[in-house]
Image (cartoon, rainbow, N blue to C red):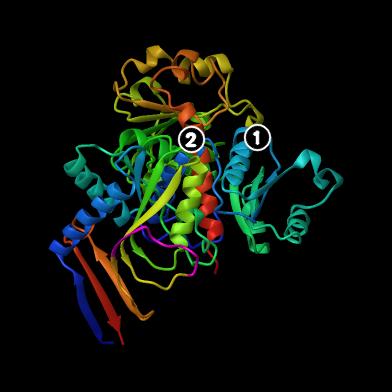
Amino acid sequence: MIDNAIKRKDLLGMDDLTVDEIEAVLETAEKLKEVSQRDIKKVPTLRGKTIINLFFEPSTRTRTSFELAAKRMSADAINISASASSVVKGETLIDTAMNLEAMNPDAVVIRHPSPGAPHIISRLLKSSVVNAGDGAHEHPTQALLDLMTVKEKKKRLSGLQVVIVGDITHSRVARSNIIGFKKSGAKVRVVGAPTLIPYGIENMGVQVSYDLKESIKDADVIMMLRIQRERQEGALLPSLREYSIRYGLDMEKLEDAPKDVIILHPGPLNRGVEISPEVADSPYSLILNQVSNGLAVRMAIFYHLLGGKE
Amino acid sequence: MKERKYVILNERDVKRTITRLSHEIIEKNKGTDGIILLGIPTRGRFLAKRVRDCIMEIEGVKVPTGAIDATLYRDDISRKDEQPPLKEMDIPENIDDKKIILFDDVLFTGRTIRAAMDVIMDFGRPMFIQLAVLVDRGHRELPIKADFIGKNLPTSLKEEVKVSLKECDGKDEVVIRETF
């Protein structure tokens, strides 16, 4: 039993969380999964709380997940997307945040293309701030749901070999997961084209490999990342076709991996680019479990951040 | 700080009490038809399981038994410094039109029972809910009363009632403790 719940106001990154806090969230999330399986998918825990989802980048999965999580805990959720807000009229991030604060929300969930944006507003707001992705920096709830999905299947995190494949440089999912898995005692290896592996990544305590087939021979977990076309400025890849041949996961490359390997992907999938449809739909794939667990993890985060009073 | 401690029920007393509660439950409900036992974790759940085993011995019927965690329905959730950990939920079958017997170790303010009843109502419409507790220590803050009581124990608010069960505490015992 984890008795020290979370006392912080904000969830900004995996970097801030202690191992105990991570375990507390996972344990709560595991219990909260049951709520989504009821006929009445709602508990009164956060009645009267207001949660604002402030999204400056397109998102369906994450935004829906946060909104549903709030609603299943009985909080009121409001979504604001940049394209439909005063941002298009030239309002700054800080002004937007201060105006929202004046309406007394209890939490602001923010996704922003600039790393550190949630950190800035967390210092200005009394309400809790949850980072739903800031540029190529962090995406903590994604890492927590990945940890939960792996733990659910493998019954442990410590000692597992995790292989993260794809565009490591531009991936906040990779960064948060490296931190989360390392803290939980797993070994992490990153794999990708040399142009997509950032210089100095070894300092995060990970192995680097450029050969997908070779690198997954001892993998317990393979995490495929989406090739982010929107973040590919410049010619980092000769072509998607070449990338797919060398770094796309298909049944042939999977042959040498252990039989009990599990495959994760944060979505949205580029079928036929980083992952073949056969692999995505195979029994190894836990992609849809990730989505269900994401909802539970976000409910758990709201539970821990919004319940307590300083 | 000094402490005074009295043992109210020892191991044999606890066993006898659970046997009596089992008989009372069967008697009042004229058998075991439609009964579901739901315990509030941690100790209420073990009590429910023991009563189930006892009813099995008496009537030869295995009554469906589960757990119901009321944490998410508490009324003090935003007044605490940090959130209590969630416990297990296990509703063994559809509860519509069933006779629910709710178990807790100690009945005190009644607030946990209120929360637990709200959880049950979110899962369906039982025929009725009855409440069974090992100890009723008084000091109700809500109009709630138990149908089956192991031990009526008038207490002062300075006293603490502690139920220990073998499953989680290594021994069966009810003690009352006063620090002064």
Q: Quadrant of residue A95?
A: bottom right
Residue at 53% from the left image edge and 35% from the top image edge: A39
Tell me which segment is drawn in magenta: B141-150
Q: Which residue is mark 2?
A: A37
Residue at 58% from the left image edge and 18% from the top image edge: A240
Residue B144 on the magenta span: yes
Q: Say which amino acid is labelled 2.
A: Gln
Which is nearer the eye, A41 or A220? A41
Q: Position of residue A63 (x, y in %)?
A: 63, 39
**Are dots 2 and 1 on a single chain?**
yes
Q: Which residue is mark 1?
A: A59
Say what secondary structure mark 1 lies in.
Answer: loop
Q: Say which amino acid is labelled 1.
A: Ser
Which is nearer the eye, A201 or A56? A56
Circle 1 chain: A
In this image, A75 relative to A262: left or right?
right
Q: Quadrant of residue B155?
A: bottom left
Say what secondary structure mark 2 lies in.
Answer: helix
Q: Position of residue B11 (x, y in %)?
A: 14, 63
Residue B26 on the magenta span: no
Say above or below: A195 vs B135. above
Q: Position of residue A221 (x, y in %)?
A: 37, 30
Residue B161 seen from this side: yes
Q: Categorize mark 2 by other alpha carbons within 10 Å: few (<14), some (14-19), many (20+).
A: few
Residue at 18% from the left image edge and 57% from the top image edge: B166
**Prevalent SS, magenta region:** loop
Residue A188 seen from this side: no
